Image (cartoon, coloured by chain):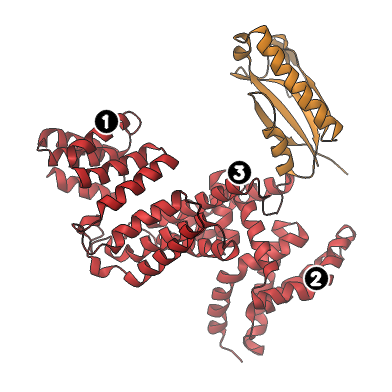
Amino acid sequence: MKYMMLIASNEDAGTTKTEAESQEVYRRIFEWWDANEKAGRIVGGHELEPSSTATTVRVDASGNATVTDGPFAEGKEMVGGYAILEVADLDEALALASSWPASDALEIRPIVTRG
Amino acid sequence: MADRSEVGARLETVLREERGRLTAALVRILRDWDLAEELVQEAAVAALEHWPADGIPLNPAAWLMTAARRKAVDRLRRHARYRERMHELTRRATEMDTPIATGGPMDADDRLRLLFTCCHPALNREAQVALTLRTIGGLETVAVARAFLVPEATIAQRLVRAKRKIRDASIPYRVPDPAELPARLAEVLRVLYLIFNEGYLASAGETPERRDLARDAEWLTSLVARLMPDEPEVLGLLSLMRIHLARSDARFAPDGSLILLPDQDRSRWDMGAVREATVLLARAGRMGRPGSYQLQAAILSSHAMSPSWSATPWTEIVPLYDALHRIEPTPVVGLNRALAIAERDGPEPALAELEPLSERLDSYHLYHAARAELLRRLDRPDEAREADRRALTLTDNPAERRLLEDRLR
């Protein structure tokens, strides 16, 4: 079963961290990611640049596209990365998300498979 | 030959008791919740056709299981991709039918698995409650709707959404690992206690389905207690519910108004049931893992075993509240603890205990009602009336409103 794990952070909280503190957070995340990738539970994913770099394109019913600065929705928690999980069921996905080594919100969504 | 109405009545009773088992056994093998429910329904229809002519079978539940299983095979035969599950169904035929008759361990596991799925934290509370009552409790959708005072379509939709999420997000059917079990079991018990309270707090004037929720929750909890006999908090919750129920006849006056504990007619309490529940609680206590439900049940048991309100053993009850407050430092527990302190040490120290809770309980009517009571005892009638008035603005429960209005008169 494949799931997408969206990783959302409070971007403001990041700015109050010292350089050493954020390095420590990154170190723990890389270590966690590597271990789960080696174990086959993570099969893809990336960290994203902050939401200040986001651009949203909206295509309406008649096919007209409008481009705006910023993410879909302005909020406190912004998606900062994602991972594609390959696990047996939701419990395994939740257990994996619960072991995320930083203070963030993680949304787990099943990936649609057709066929 | 059996009378048609007799068959109908018997079938209803059997389904009430067995729907959970039948559904659970089928879900486990078919992994399809809707299909499992449809098959149970079809088996019930078959029973209505056959039982009037053939007589009610000796073991109606086993008959229904066999019928549902045969229908499953018929259905699956048409779908090549279900072949594997069909074989499993045939292979396990004896195994599936016999535990129904004997109450064997496999069937126990099935219902537990299904219950943990119904109460999975990935489902919202309303969905957990509706699924548990419908699937394990065997209530019809319309009965769940009447109990929760919402349209039947709302409950039906909640059930559809929840089952879809279970399927699409792959919420598993299993009893959680020992590491996860405490948190997951706590979630199950929260759902059961919520169902109980919905029914228990309903006043006499409300629909019977609503009041029956308390008995439904007690039945479900006794089922969990049978399936997990070594979990002291399950026994604690069961004991708590049973002591409440033993006193339920004395809680309302004939006109439907609420009678508080000090004024209840204790001769109307079912003392046999209280004693049995207390024995159950002692068994839980011997397991050496105290918890919130056990402590609440112990407090209730002290009250229930006391021959009168004035003889209530407050010196025994306050330490139980202290322990409960340590495990569960919520403002509501703090409020009840303060009230026990009032009885042991007087209204003044109790009022001091209430003070730090004022902010967090400002919108809780019982906080203001309790404060009013203490202020009256301290001979501060104006402040007492003001607190009662504040309480009145915060509750819609008709029985509680009447009590507060009486005080203000």
For mark 2, what is the residue? B92
Q: Which chain carries label 2?
A: B
For mark 1, what is the residue? B355
Describe residue B351's horizontal placement relative to residue B337 as left or right. left
For marks 2 and 3, the one nearer the N-term is 2
For mark 3, what is the residue? B121
Describe residue A89's horizontal placement relative to residue B355 as left or right. right
**Numbered disc in front, either 2 or 1:** 1
Along the line of sight, the residue nearer the viewer: A56 or A60:
A56
Along the line of sight, the residue nearer the viewer: B356 or B196:
B356
Q: Which chain is orange?
A: A
Type of amino acid at the residue the image marks with label 3: Pro
The tally of labels here is: 3
Q: Residue placed at 72% from the left, 50% from the top? A: B172
Q: Chain B is drawn in which colour?
A: red
Q: Which chain carries label 1?
A: B
Q: Picture quarter containing residue B36?
A: bottom right
